[in-house]
Amino acid sequence: MFGTTGLFDELQRIQREMEAVLGATPWANGIRSSASSFPSVNVGTTAEAVDVYFFAPGVDPTSLDISIQNNVLNVAGERRIIREEGASYYRKERFDGEFRRTFSLPEDIDPERVDASYKDGVLHVRLQRKESSKPRQIKVS
Amino acid sequence: MTERTELAEKPATEIQPAAKQDEPVLRPAVDIFEDEGGITLHADMPGVSRDHLNVKVEGDILTIEGDAEISMPEGMEPLYADVRATHYRRSFTLSSEMDTEKVEASLKHGVLTLRIPKREEHKPKKIEVQVG
């Protein structure tokens, strides 16, 4: 999930840098991808489940709206930064406002078996795969 | 490890920053504002718990550091990753009127809040204009 930078990582990095400079890249974006990178998302898979991690610090977990429709995971929420009145601001880098991130899921996700937890600002959504698609050991008798 | 051994080991870690810099480092997004009493800093450090947070002042350099601990099942294969490192670090230079002895830090939902007060003698004093 973290770690080694391969060819595709490098391409993504170049794309991000080009977007930052030019505003857009010559190739097509995912139709559901958004310009805002809040919250950052990591996705990992195992034989049993798909684990999606949203890096969403400072969010009230009860205000998060998590849904699955047509195999698309959708997480929406809001982070309102309360500005101190009368203070002079030097930096305002942190995301402020509404956010939405979507992720296309593999076909074999069971939408009835999804857990979500929020810890230290990371929302972890675990989506179990359907029983039938899990690898099964076949014994030779 | 006791506090004492950690202090004793500190000089050793300072001699080898070159190797550490090769690790990818996340630069936390920050908001910083100043009011009459001091400076407040908020930093986004998702995945960092109190035990893995390190805030230090050396000379006039304030450094915030932390490691994100994300529980992942064994044998997980990455499918997509915006975040490609687990170590956060960012430094700021402070000015002499900041009271580094009285820095307060708190951490909630992955957001670090630091309050760095100004020394008493540097707090602005209202000067009354006498109207004669």
Image: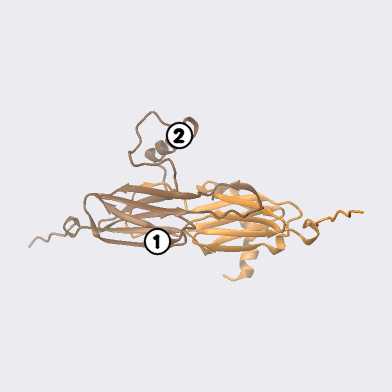
Chain colours: A brown, B orange
Residue A7 image label: none
- Work out whether residue B48 or residue B125 is closer to the camera in this orientation and state it: B125
Q: Position of residue A82 (x, y in %)?
A: 56, 55
Secondary structure under the numbered disc 1 in the rendered image: loop
**B33 and B54: which one is in front?**
B33
Front residue (pair A138, B49): B49
Amino acid at dot 2: Glu
Instruction: Please give the residue where the numbered disc 2 appears in the rendered image.
Output: A19
Residue displayed at 65% across by 60% down: B115
What is the number of the mark on residue B71? 1
* Amino acid carrying mark 1 in the image: Ser
Q: Secondary structure at mark 2?
A: helix
Q: Residue furthest right?
A: B132
Label 1: chain? B
What is the CA distance from the residue labelled 1 to the residue labelled 2?
A: 32 Å
Q: Quadrant of residue A138?
A: bottom left
Q: Residue reaching furthest left? A: A141
